Image (cartoon, rainbow, N blue to C red):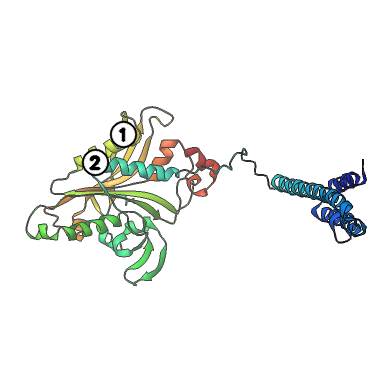
Amino acid sequence: MNELDALVESARAGFVQAATPADLENAKAQYLGKSGRITELMKGLGALSVEEKKTRGAAINQAKQAIEGALTERRQALADAELQAQLKAEALDVTLPGRQRGQGGLHPVSLTLERIEAIFGSMGFEVADGPEIESDWFNFTALNTPEDHPARSMHDTFYVEGGSEKAPNLLRTHTSPMQIRHAVQHVKRHRADLDAGRPMPEIRVIAPGRTYRVDSDATHSPMFHQCEGLWVGENVSFKDLKYVFTDFCRTFFESDDLVLRFRPSFFPFTEPSAEIDIQFQHGPLAGRWLEVAGSGQVHPNVVRNMGLDPERYIGFAFGMGPDRLTMLRYGVNDLRLFFDGDVRFLAQFR
Ligand code: PHE
């Protein structure tokens, strides 16, 4: 091997040994730099004859090109290796399974409310929503329950700021104030018909929502749900209440052999009044009477407070407990489970 070939070989070996771009540039300087081996050889040409210069110069040039080739090759190899290392370090494993998002679901009482709305909706009832902070007027007085009425003491409640001394604000103790609120709106909408003596479209509405009483044990919670129902027209009787509510219960519990009992009771805003009890004929609760609603024919004083003539308009109202219905439907024995917010309980209704 001649001296130039040996030089090329040693350069190539030096470049291969360079592990980083900086090492490589140092190695390059030894051959191609200002005082590198090739540069030195070029300088030596000056002492040669023209003929010798030609052949020697060409040979040196060839060696220089070979060294430059080896350098480029090594630079590329180092750049490739660096890229590979970077790719490896930042590797994204696209085969990793995605993170699961917990699947949510509706609260069991919400499921019941949806069910109630669907069933009454199919019977032509509207759904109305009203305030939980209510005035004494709508909660009691307009419902034929004046200030000194003993029935008020059954509804011990939470009074809140606002309102007047005569009509303080309170957390509504039942959804019955919605009877008045909704009827008044309805009457307002149909004022022209009424004034002209034309028949007014019937009031047929349910009003589900939260209600409050000072009460707390396994079957009573200070916050609970009710769903009011109201049907008022010129010819709506207690018989209609019976078939509507019976039909509702049988649909709700998906059972035709469910027996209902209308047990005489008292509410200031209905006359006559009845508690509605149901009895399952099968299953763990078979044979027991379970109270699910209060009901009755709307009291004439209440019809008047709706803005209607009690000689012409008549109807029924009921107020049921969706929490109770949910307990019966799913066999839950402690009401408080609904409001503890324990996911282990709630997840079972997903
Ligand atoms: N509001 C009554 C209660 O909370 C229930 C009821 C509603 C009774 C409508 C009659 C008519 O106990």
Q: Residues within 10 Å of mark 1 (few under 14, many from 20)?
A: some
Q: Tell me where residue 345 appears, x and y as whole percent.
A: 52, 41
Decide if residue 319 is in sight here.
Answer: yes
Q: Earlier in the sequence, mark 2 or mark 1?
A: 2
Q: Is residue 288 left or right of 66 when viewed as pictured?
A: left
Q: Is residue 106 left or right of 236 when viewed as pictured?
A: right
Badge number at residue 250 = 1
CA distance for labels 2 and 1? 14 Å
Quadrant of the image containing the N terminus: top right
Q: Is residue 276 left or right of 224 when viewed as pictured?
A: left
Q: Tell me where residue 261 appears, x and y as whole percent.
A: 29, 37
Q: Residues within 10 Å of mark 2 (few under 14, many from 20)?
A: few
Q: Who is closer to the viewer here, 109 or 95?
A: 95
| Identity of the residue drawn at 29% across and 64% down | 137
Q: Quadrant of residue 287?
A: top left
Callout 2 amino acid? Met
| Identity of the residue drawn at 36% across and 66% down | 169
| Identity of the residue drawn at 49% across and 44% down | 104
Q: Tell me where residue 172 appears, x and y as whole percent.
A: 36, 58
- SS of the residue under disc 1: helix
Q: Who is closer to the viewer here, 263 or 38?
A: 38
Residue that label 2 marks: 123
